[in-house]
Image (cartoon, rainbow, N blue to C red):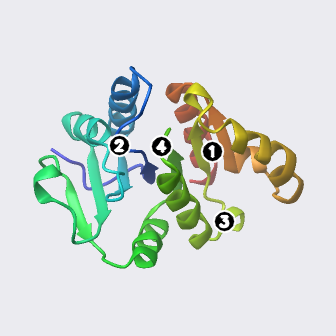
Amino acid sequence: MESAEFTHTIAVYASATADGDPDWAKVMTNVGMVLARNNVRMVCPAGDGMLCRPLVTSARSAGGTVLLIADSALDDASVPSGVLVEIVDEVHARRQRISDLAEAFIGLPCTLTAIQSLYASWILSGGGESGKPVALLNRNRAFEVFRGYTNDVLSQGLENADRLMMFSENFDELWGKLRRTLGATD
């Protein structure tokens, strides 16, 4: 049974598959379970290869709430049981809807399309000025270039860049950092 009250609503960006990572499904399953156990409502974009079944299915199996923001091209048969779907056909409006709902953004190793969508939603929410953190799972150095950019460029003009942009190779550690940051803003 889902809780009507959530500790947080977090936008999670992940790809439908991961080339070359044999443990990808296990990692996605762990992320879904951790967020569900912490009573986080996951808001996920769907479409353009971003419906990550292991992530969504594990969150639902652990009693979590998942809301997909998708266009009308979403194949209902691909949506796991119990997942909520909100149809928003225009891409800018989908990103705006996600940014309105999310208190934070999580990027899992994903396609360029998914990370572009995360960035666009974060910017629509107000970017650094919004205070909404971005947590990136840097598994297999997936976000190493962006980590360098954050350290070298963003930290110069973004106050509290280390609190707003966080990285870890391990999701449990990343979730701990994000939880502390969100707790500081509760």
**Sooner in the amino-acid sequence: mark 4 or mark 1:** 4
Residues at discs 1 and 2 in contact (Cβ within 8 Å): no
Callout 2, which amino acid? Asn
- Provide the residue designation for mark 2: 39
At x 53%, y 53%, the residue is: 115
- Provide the residue designation for mark 1: 181
Q: Secondary structure at mark 2?
A: loop
- Provide the residue designation for mark 4: 110
Callout 3, which amino acid? Gly
Quarter in which the N terminus is drawn: top left
How far apart marks 4 and 1 lie (CA) works out to: 23 Å
In the image, residue 18 sits, relative to residue 182, either above or below, namely: above
- Provide the residue designation for mark 3: 127
**Sooner in the amino-acid sequence: mark 4 or mark 3:** 4
How far apart marks 2 and 3 lie (CA) works out to: 25 Å
x%, y% of residue 95? 45, 70
